[in-house]
Amino acid sequence: MERVKKSGVRYFRKKKIGEYFNRVIGRKSLGPGQGLHYGEIFVTFGYMEIHRKSFTVQKIRVIAKNHPHFMKVTAFSTLYSLSFLSSSQPSAQKVKEADVLYDQNKFKEILHVLHPFKEEKNDEVLWRLGRALYKLSQEISDPKQKKEMIFEAYNYVSEALSINEKNSAVHKWMSIMIDAKSKYQGLKEKITQAYVMKKHMLRAVELNPKDATVLHLLGTWCFEVANMAWYERKVASTIFAAPPNSSFEEALSFFVKAEETDPCFYSMNLLMLGKTYLKLNNKDKAKHYLELVQGYPQKTAEDAQAHIMFIKEICN
């Protein structure tokens, strides 16, 4: 039977499917000699599975009433329809596979696993594609390519948000991507997006209070606002009636909470704890966390960056 591809999903030609479907619901029995093969019935139920929203309970009851062998056909057709759709629909197994690869810092492999499903309007797939692209961008030295990857990653996460507003991971990565993107759009845009970033962080915490990474992001937001230069504050005052405001004490509270939630989960959180304690003139605490950064395994580009920033802090 001839098949065609449409939007990454295989469809049998509509005319042939319609013919089989009409033969099924119009037949009084499925006995031998009727000229209708089980293979044709499987196609019909596969079609019903793809377009299940358009089939009412009444339609299904009509089929069940007219066919004594309906239950047998349903059992076989369920297996058929699952195999029919498995090549095109992202499964939970693929998402799990991507998460295992993420823990191994295999970001290119994540793109290979999930990219075939990017058109499936699945928020769990889309934000993970954005995350993998962003992580890869941190390893790229070419500024133009880095920018392109960050903007593409932003688009994936933005689409995920439009699909599911109640996904905490989407809000977390939306805040990260807004920050990364705004760095290419000038100081004014970066300051303008500050409240939008915080809104997504707070929403992510609301949906998942135990996410240490979001707590770290909130701490970083507070630290950067508290550490704004005088000219940045002047620009902010021209944009907002009430410019963003925070303190190093507030930043510290988020960094500490992140560390309590998941100890030593992130080299950057250790670094920011050290930097914040230095801002608060607590040199003993600062030394403790900066030494942890020094001994932290450099598995990712961010770990290497944290180590470089640690050296800068020591030199200063």
Image (cartoon, rainbow, N blue to C red):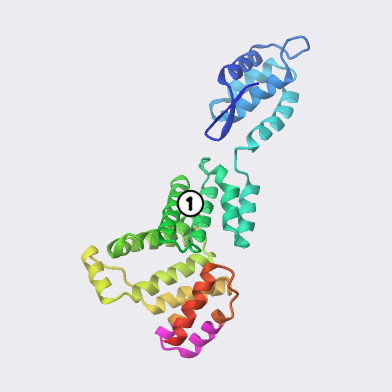
Foreground of the two, 239 or 154: 154
Please provide the residue range marked out in magenta: 277-291
Foreground of the two, 167 or 132: 132
- Quadrant assignment, res 183: bottom left
Residue 96 visible (yes or no): yes
Does the magenta run of residues contain 165? no
Left or right of 40 on screen, residue 195: left
Q: In this view, which residue lies farthest toward the left?
A: 238
Task: State how many labels appear.
Answer: 1
Query: How busy is the neighbourhood of tag 1: few (under 14 within 10 Å), some, or many (20 plus)?
Result: few
In the image, is residue 63 above or below residue 293?
A: above
Q: Residue at x 75, y 24 (%)?
A: 72
Tell me the amino acid under the disc marked 1.
Lys
In the image, is residue 239 above or below residue 12?
A: below
| Residue 261: x %, y % from top left | 56, 71
> Which image quarter holds the C terminus?
bottom left
Q: Which residue is mark 1?
A: 166
Residue 257 visible (yes or no): no
**Disc 1 secondary structure class:** loop
Does the magenta run of residues contain 288? yes
Q: Residue at x 44, y 47 (%)?
A: 159
| Residue 198: x %, y % from top left | 39, 63
| Residue 226: x %, y % from top left | 34, 76
| Residue 87: x %, y % from top left | 63, 37
Left or right of 303 on screen, residue 196: left
Q: In this view, which residue lies farthest toward the front?
A: 142
Q: Main secondary structure of the magenta part?
A: helix
